[in-house]
Image: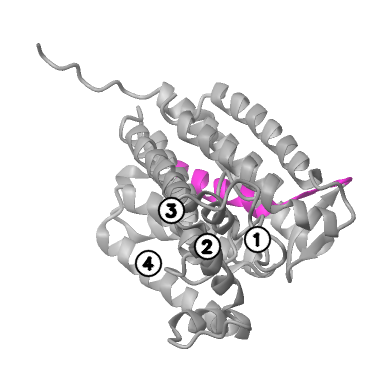
Amino acid sequence: MALAAPVAVLVVIGLGAVMSSSSVVAIRGGLDQYAIFERQLLFVAIGIAAMIVTTKIPYQAYARWAPLILMVAIGGLAATQLVGTVRGGSRSWIGIGAFTVQPSEFAKFAVVTYLAAVLARKEGYLGQFSHVALPAIGSLGVVSALVMLQPDLGTTILIVVAAFAVIVASEAPVRHVAALGLASLGGAVFLARAAPYRWQRLTAWFDSTPDILGADLQVHQAQVALGSGGLFGVGLGASRARWSYLPNAHTDFIFAIIGEETGLAGSLTVILFFVFFTVVGAVVAMRASDSFGRLLAIGLVTWLSFQAIVNIGGVVDALPITGVPLPFISVGGSAMIVNLAVVGVLLNIARSGVEPPARRS
């Protein structure tokens, strides 16, 4: 229950922010002003249903299904290159009737689950580098390559970080973790340098004279929105940034709208609930009844928490912009459904966990 509470609050906050931030986009697209909000409400309902289902599934089953889950994720990512649709320069979605599916969201769960299952099973053999490197490179290499073909460096970074959280938490020696970490860091720099727009976005963050009409437009407008909010905000539904001043206000930059409408108080509330979720998630991992549950919980919590850090950090200009949504809050069907389903998995791990020892009176 302690894990579900912060998630429920974040989802409710997100729905309110979506109602406000998406209305202008909907109107300018010839839709009813609540069309995007109603669609997001549907995804939340589906996500809650998925969470209820995953709460009932014993988490140990994912260890047996891990190879199949990874293969399905790889198949979905490969399919985006054949029949995927392009949005914002990235071929990340597959159209299914009136809806679209983003396989990379499922791939995050697949990689974490696969590595947790393999490293838990090989616990006594992780002193040998091959037993750590082969499953890590095999799963991360294929998935990362397919995600980068879209291309989507932000999601690739999230997958790698979540996977490394699993590796660090395993019995793998520090020297093996360090070797894989250095290799991944080198790969990230290479990928960032390989595409001019990604390198420009990174160097713009370091530039002391930002280009507020070019590469730094979104960050600048986000700063204006946050600054306009003051301590308690301009009021719910009264955002000015949403009127096309701030691109992607209902997706990647929705935190700026929250800050504008509810002020510093509202922004800090969102951050505190993410911190609460992270702390409770860490406790769930520590109390897991077996190694697989512990590694799985650590990977899942790291993924969602780090994604929140990356998104909020980008909006407040503490980190480079990566284009990843804010979990439980930003508009997005696949992300919302998968994220809530992951919460169900964590709840099942918590339910099966070891109770802390009772205090002596």
Residue 181's mark?
4
Would you identify the image quadrant in which residue 244 lies?
A: bottom right
**CA distance for labels 4 and 3:** 40 Å
**Which secondary structure lies at badge 4?**
helix
Q: Which residue shows up at 41% across the image and 27% down it?
A: 2
CB-based contact (under 8 Å), mark 2 and mark 3: no
Amino acid residing under circle 3: Leu
Which mark is first along the chain, 4 or 2?
Answer: 4
Q: Which residue shows up at 48% across the image and 74% down it?
A: 188
**CA distance for labels 4 and 1:** 43 Å
Question: Residue 209: percent from the left, percent from the top?
Answer: 47, 88
Q: Which residue corresponds to mark 2?
A: 228
Would you identify the image quadrant in which residue 142 lies?
A: bottom right
Residue 101, magenta (yes or no): yes
**Which secondary structure lies at badge 2?**
helix
Amino acid residing under circle 4: Gly
Residue 240's mark?
1
**Which secondary structure lies at badge 3?**
loop
Amino acid residing under circle 1: Arg
Residue 187's mark?
none
Q: Which residue corresponds to mark 3?
A: 231
Using the rendered image of the protein, determine whether residue 344 is visible from the camera's viewpoint. Answer: yes
The tally of labels here is 4
Dominant secondary structure (helix, strand or loop) of the stretch shown in magenta: helix
Q: State left or right for residue 166 relative to residue 124.
A: right
Question: Residue 162: percent from the left, percent from the top?
Answer: 45, 53
CB-based contact (under 8 Å), mark 2 and mark 1: yes
Q: Which residues are magenta?
A: 97-118
Looking at the image, is 149 positioned above or below residue 74? below
